Amino acid sequence: MIDMQPSFGTLLQSWRRRRRLSQLDLAVEAGISQRHLSFVETGRSSPSRDMVLHLAEHLSVPARERNAMLVAAGYAPLLRDRGIDHPDLAAARAAVDAILAGHAPNPALAVDRHWNIVTTNKAVAPLLDGIDPTLLGPGANALRISLHPGGLAPRIRNYRDWRAHVLGRLMRQIDVSADPALVALTEELKSYPPPANARPPTPGEAAYGGIVVLLELGIPDGATLRLLTTTTVFGTAVDIGLSELAIESFFPADPESAAELARLTAR
C-alpha cells in the first residue's frame, strides 16, 4: 500500500473552503489573480515557497499545517518541532517553569495542542486528590480529567456550564486547526454522562460579570473554589511544539477562594 499524501493544491483548497472563502475572495485578499489561484489548486501551476507561505498567511493556517503545505509543494518545512524538553529550548522551558511557579498558590498548568498536560505547578496536585489514578500520569489530558466521571466532574458545581464552555472552546480550536485528534477528543467528552447532582445550566450567559465562565470546583473538605481562567501562549515561537504550548492559569474569583488556595498549597 502506498501512503498517498495530499497535494499542495488539495490542501490549499481544503483550507480555503474551511475559511469559507471562494477562489475570488482569496485571490483578492492575497493580491493575485483568480486564474493563477485556480491553476495552483488544480496543480497546473507550481507555487513558489514564498507564495505557499503568502497563501497560508491569508488563510490563517496554523504553523504545523503550514509545514505540511510546504512539504506538499516540494519545499523544506519552515519550523522545527523539537519538544519543550529539547536542549535548544531550555530558555523557553525555564520561562514556562517560572510562570507556573510564580503563579502559586493559584493553580496553573502547561498543555500541548491536544490538552495533554506537559507540566503543572504545585497548586494543581491538591485539586486532583481522590480522582481515578488511570486519568493521571504520562499522557494525562486536562479536559478528560475535568469532565470524566472518575475525574473532577462530580466536584464541578456548575458542570453543565463548564462542559458547554470546554466543548465550545474545542470546537473553535477545530475550526482553526482541523485537527482530527481534537475532533476525537470532543466526541469522547460528549459521550461522558453528566454527574447525578449536575444542576441545570445557568439561564442566559453563564459568565462572571458577563465576561468569563467560572469554574466552581468542590474540594474534599467541602469548600467550593470559584476560579477564573486565562491562557498564555508564546506569540513569537520559532518551534512548532512551542507555538502550540498553552499555559492555563486559574485565579480566585473571591477572597474565600484565594484563602482556600493558599491553605491547600501550604499543606
Image (cartoon, helix red, strand yellow):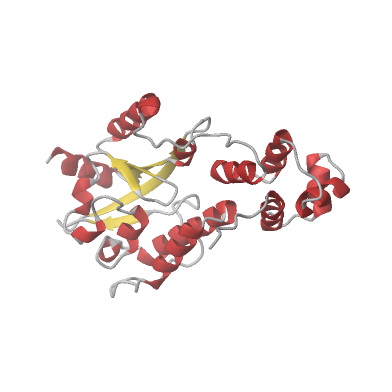
User: Which quarter of the rendering shows the C terminus?
Assistant: top left
- Residue at 72%, 37% (x, y): give it: 54
User: Eyeballing the image, is 51 above or below 140?
Assistant: above
- Residue 252, compared with residue 159, is above or below; it is above
Residue 163 visible in rendering: yes
Q: Position of residue 265 (x, y in %)?
A: 18, 40
Q: Position of residue 221 (x, y in %)?
A: 14, 56
> Which of 263/235 is in front?
235
Number of marks in the image? 0
Q: Can the viewer see residue 131?
A: no
Q: Position of residue 124 (x, y in %)?
A: 25, 45
Left or right of residue 246, residue 197 in this image: left
Q: Is residue 87 above or below residue 49?
A: above
Q: Position of residue 102 (x, y in %)?
A: 30, 30
Which residue is more in the foreground, 208 or 180?
180
Q: Residue at x 82, y 52 (%)?
A: 38
Image position of 28 (left or right of 254) = right
Residue located at (23% from left, 42% from top): 123
Q: Residue furthest front?
A: 1
Residue at position x 30%, y 53% in the image? 140
Q: Nearer the viewer, residue 233 or 267?
A: 233
The quarter holding residue 58 reads top right
In the rendered image, the residue lying farthest to the left is 267
